[in-house]
Amino acid sequence: MDFAYDARTEELRDALLAFMDECVYPAEAEYARQLSERADPWAVPAVVGELQREARDRGLWNFFLPGADGAGLSNLQYAPLAEITGRSPRLAPAALNCSAPDTGNMEVLSMFGTEDQREQWLRPLLDGRIRSSFAMTEPDVASSDATNIATRIERDGDQYVINGRKWWITGALNPDAKVLIVMGKTDPQAETHRQQSMILVPRDTPGLTITRGMTVFGYDDGDHGGHADLEFTDVRVPAENLIGTEGDGFAIAQARLGPGRIHHCMRSIGIAERAVEMMCRRASERVAFGEQLARQGVIRDWIAEARVRIEQLRLLVLKAAWLMDTVGNKGAHTEIQAIKIATPSTVEWILDKAIQVHGAGGLSQDTPLAEWYASIRTLRFADGPDEVHKASLARKELRAHA
Amino acid sequence: MDFAYDARTEELRDALLAFMDECVYPAEAEYARQLSERADPWAVPAVVGELQREARDRGLWNFFLPGADGAGLSNLQYAPLAEITGRSPRLAPAALNCSAPDTGNMEVLSMFGTEDQREQWLRPLLDGRIRSSFAMTEPDVASSDATNIATRIERDGDQYVINGRKWWITGALNPDAKVLIVMGKTDPQAETHRQQSMILVPRDTPGLTITRGMTVFGYDDGDHGGHADLEFTDVRVPAENLIGTEGDGFAIAQARLGPGRIHHCMRSIGIAERAVEMMCRRASERVAFGEQLARQGVIRDWIAEARVRIEQLRLLVLKAAWLMDTVGNKGAHTEIQAIKIATPSTVEWILDKAIQVHGAGGLSQDTPLAEWYASIRTLRFADGPDEVHKASLARKELRAHA
Amino acid sequence: MDFAYDARTEELRDALLAFMDECVYPAEAEYARQLSERADPWAVPAVVGELQREARDRGLWNFFLPGADGAGLSNLQYAPLAEITGRSPRLAPAALNCSAPDTGNMEVLSMFGTEDQREQWLRPLLDGRIRSSFAMTEPDVASSDATNIATRIERDGDQYVINGRKWWITGALNPDAKVLIVMGKTDPQAETHRQQSMILVPRDTPGLTITRGMTVFGYDDGDHGGHADLEFTDVRVPAENLIGTEGDGFAIAQARLGPGRIHHCMRSIGIAERAVEMMCRRASERVAFGEQLARQGVIRDWIAEARVRIEQLRLLVLKAAWLMDTVGNKGAHTEIQAIKIATPSTVEWILDKAIQVHGAGGLSQDTPLAEWYASIRTLRFADGPDEVHKASLARKELRAHA
Amino acid sequence: MDFAYDARTEELRDALLAFMDECVYPAEAEYARQLSERADPWAVPAVVGELQREARDRGLWNFFLPGADGAGLSNLQYAPLAEITGRSPRLAPAALNCSAPDTGNMEVLSMFGTEDQREQWLRPLLDGRIRSSFAMTEPDVASSDATNIATRIERDGDQYVINGRKWWITGALNPDAKVLIVMGKTDPQAETHRQQSMILVPRDTPGLTITRGMTVFGYDDGDHGGHADLEFTDVRVPAENLIGTEGDGFAIAQARLGPGRIHHCMRSIGIAERAVEMMCRRASERVAFGEQLARQGVIRDWIAEARVRIEQLRLLVLKAAWLMDTVGNKGAHTEIQAIKIATPSTVEWILDKAIQVHGAGGLSQDTPLAEWYASIRTLRFADGPDEVHKASLARKELRAHA
């Protein structure tokens, strides 16, 4: 259980921290301005492209992806870097080409894609030239229960025909999101975990309609492509768009899950750290009833609690990363569940207190705190609600002591 | 301590419940449609006007206002009615002409307005022909600390000249909000609680600029006039626009506070009740992993907790109302603080659980739950953060046992 | 819903408050001294008897019992009196002959006892000449699940023969507890709720063995007769000791429950109030790091929270009392469950904070706080764990919105 | 940050786990029996001595003490071993000669003792032949505020004369506790942190009176020497009993603190782990209303939460241990404060739930859960209340972001 940063990590941290200070934080205001002024509500502001070029020039690129396709980092090497990007969650992950859902999609294509699929989609994704979406969640099925997926993917000659509805498809409203990976059932009669397949669907394929963007609290998350409600009506794609073979969908989804969860948690810690910073700074600057907020016992209590909780959470995330590296995603299953459970409640609590210290402004566009709260709140549903993960974790614990 | 509903209350409750069933709930979908389709993002959908006419025809009007100007109800009579309107908080209070901040403004004009002020502003407000705003909060001053207000109201001949900045001015972006009551300092040298005055400022007065709308989580609350950031630059109004005399501002603000708080709390309980209903219905309908959500122990626990907490909260609000009626706002001070503290945390908790039972849809535009959460969250700042009220309540308790 | 104290209540409150000030509080130290010095660890200190005589002389007696046998108070009249006795929970309820489990037993005998039973047991209980116990809970059966009781009560000629084990039989170690009401099965073949009966068993009946006293945290509760573990081996009593007829046991237990729960809750509020008082006084007196504890924000926050929670809880208890008086125990079922759920968690929280303000001394014999905590903690199990009551309450709520 | 167990740790863990299984767990029942039957309420049961002999034979001895006097383990090596001893907290630490307060006292003598002091007191302590106490806490001074200590240690010729009152002196009622280390002021005029000194006082020195044992909840903790209230009246000891030189007291106390805190936290995690085990086992065995408790959602939720919280807490404790080893107690200050804050609240929560799953028996002598709860509860006061530590931690955080 060695969580120390090795030389490569230290080097990349230094480079990334410099990039944050020199490029990312200074760009935040410009980003907000461009967002408020753009014509297309789903377009990505130009400043993101500029940051991407700069980041790539600095060698800060595709950190998330192990192996030759990416930066070749282990999870434990990536963890502290991902945390740092979380400090500016709208800009930094995109700047480094490390944004969900592209990261998961690139992992899938890197692991399971054919030569052609890699050439056509993985290459431009790795280069940051296009974006992508992952279409799994459906409105009528608990998203934690992949076996119940209703979308059909049916073979018809040398094509597959897709019918169904997907929602909460993050990024799909972004005009740059050129392709979706769609999960559906190729064989509802097969055994439970061999019924599903994944298939690549170009965004402009006839029959694919974006009916609306879902909002989270009041945010449409238009800066990173929103969350689309999608209708698939006789959507036809070539048979070679299938990823792996028929029935591989469930296994691919499982493989995609672990890293996705841990990346979210790492970035969330970065959010929490920045929130604590903001809370401390505000408390030091603001005076009410003749006293600095920083001198109020209740606010000090929040700050101390925040520190104690973050420290514990980070260590757990590091342990999960280390386990994924050393014994694999399966061996890290309990820890991945644990961070999935612990992260949103911890970070939500901290953001709520940071908001409170900021007064009503903390709920508004004048700070990013409320927007971060909204995005962290969604984690309690991502890949199934916390309650499902807790029940599963408890069953394991009960078996261990039976 | 008699909280029983008297005959008049029972009669009005029946009439109001019928109005909700026959008119309000059915109008909710149309309201949402009109909102999404309107050209002016701050305009009020037409359906509200229709509901207002219907409500007034049914005698469901101005319940909030005691005395001859209004329906003449006591706080205890109004409480259960306000709770019912809270069940559709975007529509029902407006339909009955019982929306903040107009309610508080009408109270002020009813109590302190001159004959002319009443004629010019109170009459059309009572008739629902115009809306209004209340401009007190400032960005650089803790809003719980009225003595620090920086906005100046200076006498110049037969006019007053206003300079300053106000924000979070709810409703001011609504083009129908024809007048603002503005709090500022007429005499910074007077004793602490005699420095402030209130003055009526027509919305189209030169020098008054709406610089932007503040958002709450991502919501602009455009359906009820948003929350404006306002700049007053040499805004001139006739001297007779002053409410009361110079130096009355603080006392008027205090008089306005009590009812405002209790109305918010009453409506919040209505929100909580509807959230519990929605949570129960969703839990009964939704199946995950082959089991109705309603059969899951954790969800049952939330439902029971919600019931237990609502029951306690409602009784406390009723007690505060009863005290206001029997011993006055001052005598009810502790209880008004107590409901101000208890309400948002209770209702937030219930909304959070209701959202969780609804899955990601609970955070989206498909339910009103996230929007309600956002609006309840602001109550923890309204008239000063909870922490200020707790500190004050504790001082009183400490004195009692010294 | 009228919770106002009527004239009789006001009069009794005044008399009771005077009794507390003049007799009970001053006797607390002497009580502690006698407890620590007594020879028999289960004997009741003499000061209790003196207080009883004084209370009876003052007309402060058997308040808990409605009807001609008792003081004839309604639940709503008794509630504020019971709360006051809760402020000195070891002394005042006993002084007024209003201690559990005698109260419940007197209710049972008053409602269901034969003339002989009333003469032999109810009379001396009403006079405070003897004490009693109620033997229902069994180690191997969830005590919330009366239908599973294993103890047998078998008819043998003109006797009943009792076999089984009971535990947590409060008061039974007190040598003055001359009789037990024992619940057992007379007919395991009858329908579920007609299998049980209750029977009177004099404490010295052969075959009845007290194997030990159970402790709660470290307390043996020897000052009020402890909690006995009892073995019944062929215990024979006359057939006329049966209360009601065979099969009435379940119904009698239900009838006994409601008042028992509400009395506990009332007294618990008295405990909470006294804890707040102690917390305030200590905070005002104690200085740490040069600052009065009362000036620390965190402690003020606790005090305010305590006040807000107590106010809500008391109103809920009053409502339950009022419902029991107006629509009966059955009509008050939801509210009785609600106070059973809300009371221990609220009062535990307050006691925990009061302890914290007192420092380590708060956990010791130097304050009664830890002992009160222990006794409140047991309420989360009494008549079944909270979780059972919550599940039941949720089912009702779910049905209401189905 | 390498928390992996090295070879020596693994070896000792194996040996210790075997000792727990073969000797400690089997002895628990016998220990309870001997406790309940002993004549002297403060005597240590004989079984402890037997376990000590066995442990020493197996090389499981003085693990807590680094350097040549002890087992020479680092904090990181000791941590997992201390956790294991926490699983039987009344027996295992004593069996391995690793019980507080002897551990801290041995550290002090090992670091600061003269050759004579080491010979006379450290040697027999290291051999487990005697026990000891540490007398610092005073009733009228916040124990977190060592500078206010009132006890006087005055030089008189070749003696020191001690006057004052100490309480919560753990272990001092044990007749085997042959010596106390007493903290007092030798020079109230010196600068704040040079006023205090520590001195060795044999237990039978005239003028030293044990006035009573303090209880924690109802427990006198007589099995490990209780918590004494001590009076020092002209207690005379030779001048060479001083530890270090006059004025060293504060610095020695600081040096003693770090290890003491971390040992407590390590053992507390062992308590938590055993509580989870007991909770799981009980939930699997117990049936209520026809359903295994382990199938109830609420109980599963508790079990999952417990696991998630323990994992985080353990990692934080390991990090603190690792920091103490690598950068010293001072460098680990924040983390030591953090574990001091996090441990009791986490473990209390778990014990409360474990108790709840056990029913009323969980509060009684039939499980150790309530006793553990009481002992963990005291940690929120040990070396100052949590609130003091939180305030200090917050100040540091605020400074970091100023």
Image: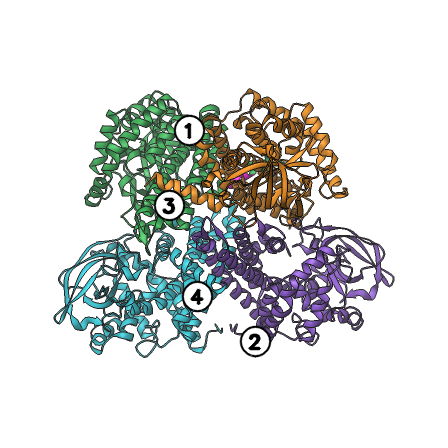
Chain colours: A purple, B orange, C green, D cyan
Q: Chain of mark 2?
A: A
- Amino acid tagged 2: Glu
Give above or below for A96 relative to B242: below
Residue B269 in the image, given as x and y percentages of width and height: 56, 36
Magenta stretch: includes residue C392: yes
Give above or below for D102 relative to B133: below
Which residue in the protein does label 1 denote?
Answer: C246
Judge by depth and name the residue closer to the eye, B320 or A125: B320
Q: Residues within 10 Å of mark 3 (few under 14, many from 20)?
A: many
Please name the residue shown 58% across and 67% down the image: A331
- Amino acid tagged 1: Glu
Spatial distance from mark 2 to mark 1, Cα to Cα? 80 Å
| Cβ–Cβ under 8 Å for marks 2 and 3 | no
Q: Is residue D212 left or right of residue B173?
A: left
Spatial distance from mark 2 to mark 3, Cα to Cα? 49 Å
Which residue in the protein does label 4 denote?
Answer: D335
Spatial distance from mark 4 to mark 1, Cα to Cα? 65 Å
Give the magenta-colored segment's residue range: C390-394
- Amino acid tagged 3: Leu
Asked if badge 2 and badge 1 are on a common chain, one would say: no
- Amino acid tagged 4: Glu
Give above or below for D44 relative to C309: below
Judge by depth and name the residue closer to the eye, B379 or D252: B379
Q: Secondary structure at mark 4?
A: helix
Q: Residue furthest right?
A: A157
